[in-house]
Image (spheres, rainbow, N blue to C red):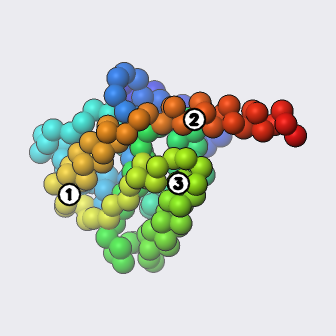
Amino acid sequence: MTDRTEDSGNIQVVLEGAGRKIVVFACTWCALIGADGAGKKRISLPATFRVIPVECISRVEADAVIRAFTSGIDGVAVMGCHLGGCRHNGANLRSARKLELLKPLLDTVGIDSRRLFTSYGTAHEYHQFAQAIESFCSQIGEMPPVSAWSRSFVRAMSARGENE
């Protein structure tokens, strides 16, 4: 079950139930259509992910990814058009570079960079969407929950504030 609330223009996604929590930012022109195609073909997919449509993956900022992790999301997938095939003048190329730069930062603060997944495909590749989600969900399922990291991070930041 998904509960969506609008908060200052941001969508906060709360996933209920057991299992890992995974958020997928999906380009409305490619990945979202692929997700829809997988659903229409009744391809079995894990129930632990939720899709957030975005006009282009270039709209997914690094702080949105970090906020997802600090709020307890175990994995973030950013799925867009083929590199070089973006409707927005190659915006996904810039986004791909930006997301690759984010991975070392995630490792530095103790979040395994494998928790951030990027994929690029076309709208008719519903099978690619399904395979990518299945693989990513399986990978996240083998990792400890990110909530353990967020609790230790909050404790470390609180201790740091007391020492200053």
Q: Nearer the viewer, mark 2 or mark 1?
A: 2
How far is disc 3 from disc 2 in space, using C-alphas? 14 Å
Residue 115 against residue 3 in the figure, above or below: below
Instruction: Give percent across and percent down for residue 102.
Output: 54, 60
The three-letter code of the residue at mark 3 reads Asp
First in sequence, mark 1 or 3: give its number.
3
How far is disc 2 from disc 1 in space, using C-alphas? 31 Å
Q: Nearer the viewer, mark 1 or mark 3?
A: 3
How far is disc 1 from disc 3 in space, using C-alphas? 27 Å
Badge 1 is on which residue? 128
Residue 17 against residue 91 in the figure, above or below: above
The residue nearer to you, when weighing 44 against 113, is: 113
The three-letter code of the residue at mark 2 reads Ser
Residue under the image location 75 percent in, 33 percent down: 158
The residue nearer to you, when weighing 158 against 50, is: 158
Tally the numbered discs.
Answer: 3
User: How busy is the neighbourhood of tag 2: few (under 14 within 10 Å), some, or many (20 plus)?
Assistant: some
Instruction: Give percent across and percent down for residue 21.
Output: 40, 34
* Side of 116 where 98 appears, left or right: right
Numbered label attached to residue 150: 2
Quadrant of res 86 = bottom left
Badge 3 is on which residue? 107
Q: Secondary structure at mark 3?
A: helix
Q: Secondary structure at mark 1?
A: helix
Residue under the image location 43 percent in, 39 percent down: 74
First in sequence, mark 3 or 2: give its number.
3
Instruction: Give percent across and percent down for residue 26.
Output: 38, 53
User: How busy is the neighbourhood of tag 3: few (under 14 within 10 Å), some, or many (20 plus)?
Assistant: few
